[in-house]
Image: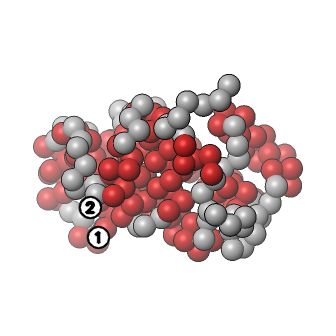
Amino acid sequence: MGEEISRFGSVRLADLPEDLRQRIGAIAEKSGFVPNVFLALGHRPAELRAFCDYHDALMERDSALSKAERELVVVTTSAANHCTYCIVAHGAILRVRTKDDQVADLVAANPWGAPLSERQRAIVDLALSVAQDSARFGERELAAARAAQLSDDEIWDIGAITAFFAMSNRLAHLMALRPNDEFFLMGRVPREK
C-alpha cells in the first residue's frame, strides 16, 4: 500500500505533546508499533485526547461485556460502515482477544451468516440495528436484546460503542486512513519476541 497514512498528513510520535506521547507510547510499547490513527489525529491534539478518553471510557472500563465482545461490536459497526481501517485494526484485536483467526473476517464479510454463539448473535444484531438505521431503533430491538439476556447496561455499552465507532469510521473515511501493515497478521501468526 502507499506510504501516506492520511490524506491530511500525520505527525511523528515525537511531535505529540508530552501527555499524548506517553499515552500513545505505552500503546506502541505493548503492540510493537504506533497505530496510524494516533499519528493521523495527532495534528489536532485536543481532539486526539478527547478521542482517546472516550475510547478508553467505553473500551477499557469494567463491564459485563468482555473486551472481546466489545471488539466484536467494533468490527460489526465498522463493517456496516465499510471502514477498512477499523475492520483491519479491530479485526486484529478481535482475533487476539478471542484466539480465533477467523471470527473477525466472518463477521466483517457477513455478520448475519457468521457462526456465532447466541450471546454473540444478540450483540451483533443489536450493533447492526444501531449502526444501520439508528432512527428506527426502538422497543422491538430492546426486547430482542433483553430476551437474549443482555442487561440494560450491556445494551447501553453496545449502543455507545457502536455510536463512537460510527464517528471513528467517518473520520477514517475523511482521512483515507491507511491501516498499519502489522494489523494484517496480528492474531494470525505468532508474534516475534
Q: Is residue 173 above or below residue 85?
A: below
The label shown at residue 133 is: 1
Q: Is residue 57 above or below residue 1?
A: above
Q: Is residue 69 above or below residue 177?
A: above
Classify residue 166 as left or right of residue 103.
Answer: right
Q: Amino acid at mark 1?
A: Asp
Residue 117: percent from left, percent from top: 22, 37
How far apart marks 2 and 1 lie (CA) works out to 6 Å
**Residue visible at 50% across and 44% down in the picture:** 92
Few, some or many C-alpha atoms within 10 Å of disc 1 (few <14, some 14-19, many ≥20)? few
Residue 33: percent from left, percent from top: 70, 43
Pick the front one: 86 or 109: 109
The label shown at residue 5 is: none
Name the image quarter holding the C terminus.
top right
**Residue visible at 49% across and 37% down in the picture:** 187
Pick the front one: 187 or 134: 187
Q: Is residue 51 visible?
A: yes
**Residue visible at 24% across and 64% down in the picture:** 137
Q: Determine whether the residue tagged by mark 1 lies in a helix, strand or loop.
A: helix
- Image quadrant in which you'd find residue 134: bottom left
Q: Is residue 48 visible?
A: no
Q: Are marks 2 and 1 in contact (CB under 8 Å)?
A: yes
Name the image quarter holding the N terminus.
bottom right
Few, some or many C-alpha atoms within 10 Å of disc 2 (few <14, some 14-19, many ≥20)? some
Residue 3: percent from left, percent from top: 72, 64
**Residue visible at 60% across and 57% down in the picture:** 179
Q: Determine whether the residue tagged by mark 2 lies in a helix, strand or loop.
A: helix
Q: Amino acid at mark 2?
A: Ser
Pick the front one: 41 or 101: 101
| Colouring chosen for the image of the structure | secondary structure
For mark 2, what is the residue? 129
